[in-house]
Amino acid sequence: MTPAVFLDRDGTVCRRRPDHVKSWAEFEWLTGAREAIARLTRAGLPVLFVTNQSAIGRGLTTQREVDDIHARMLTEIQEAGGEVMGIYVCPHRPEDRCDCRKPEPGLLLRAAREHGIDLLQSFTIGDAWTDIAAGRRAGTRTILLTTEASPAMYLASETGGAWPPDDFAPDLANAVDIVLRSSNPSALR
């Protein structure tokens, strides 16, 4: 079994929008995100995305449109030298109460089964308490990004402190520094 890094999408690699990222035209990379993923790839750490996309369940976009976003995202990640092992999407609305929508760990557990991932040696990186709760419930170490809309106070207020992150980082590049120092100090590049 191998460790991996699970990434949220909106607010972690692309700018979060209050009306959801519904098309490639609305997708805006956060500074350094592609390069950070490439660093994980060079270090030999598999990268997987786990993302809630309730805009599908709400009828604001389609599965086809989200698939197009992800295909284009993967192309740009590859052009920057990164690789992604898989993308796991929950299309449900919060009120559907599925087991794949974060804060539930279903997407991470499924990815771990399908790819032989050692969750206890893995990391989950995201900008919301739901990312941290899902990662903690799955057994991964967690890093909360404190840029965009997710300061530490947000985490505490939403969960009552039940799911604190293991670490904080201002952006994905700094979160990758934490991962690489924890996984292999010589991999920090």
Image: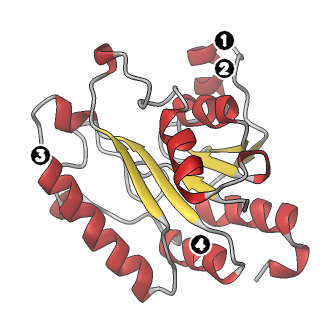
Q: Are marks 1 and 2 in contact (CB under 8 Å)?
A: yes
Q: Residue 55 at x, y = what percent?
A: 21, 36
Label 1 or label 4, whichever comes before in sequence order: 4
The quadrant in which the C terminus is found is: bottom right
The residue type indicated by label 1 comes to Gly
Question: Which of these two is toward me, 21 or 97?
Answer: 97
Label 2 or label 4, whichever comes before in sequence order: 4
The residue type indicated by label 3 comes to Thr
Question: Which of these two is toward me, 110 or 58?
Answer: 110
Q: Residue 184 at x, y = what percent?
A: 86, 72
Q: CA distance from mark 1 to mark 3?
A: 34 Å
Q: Are marks 1 and 4 in contact (CB under 8 Å)?
A: no
User: In the drawing, what numbered circle is on residue 42?
Assistant: none
Q: CA distance from mark 1 to mark 4?
A: 31 Å
Tell me if residue 133 can be seen. yes
Residue drawn at the location 50% of the way across and 77% of the way down: 83
Residue drawn at the location 22% of the way across and 59% of the way down: 67
Q: Which residue is mark 3?
A: 62
State left or right for residue 111 relative to residue 16: right
Tell me if residue 171 can be seen. no
State left or right for residue 64 relative to residue 82: left
The residue type indicated by label 4 comes to Ala
Q: Which residue is mark 2?
A: 156
Secondary structure beneath label 2: helix
Q: CA distance from mark 2 to mark 4?
A: 27 Å
Q: Which residue is mark 4?
A: 36
Residue drawn at the location 63% of the way across and 57% of the way down: 116
The quadrant in which the N terminus is found is: bottom right
Q: Residues within 10 Å of mark 4 (few under 14, many from 20)?
A: many
Q: Which residue is mark 1?
A: 160
Secondary structure beneath label 3: loop
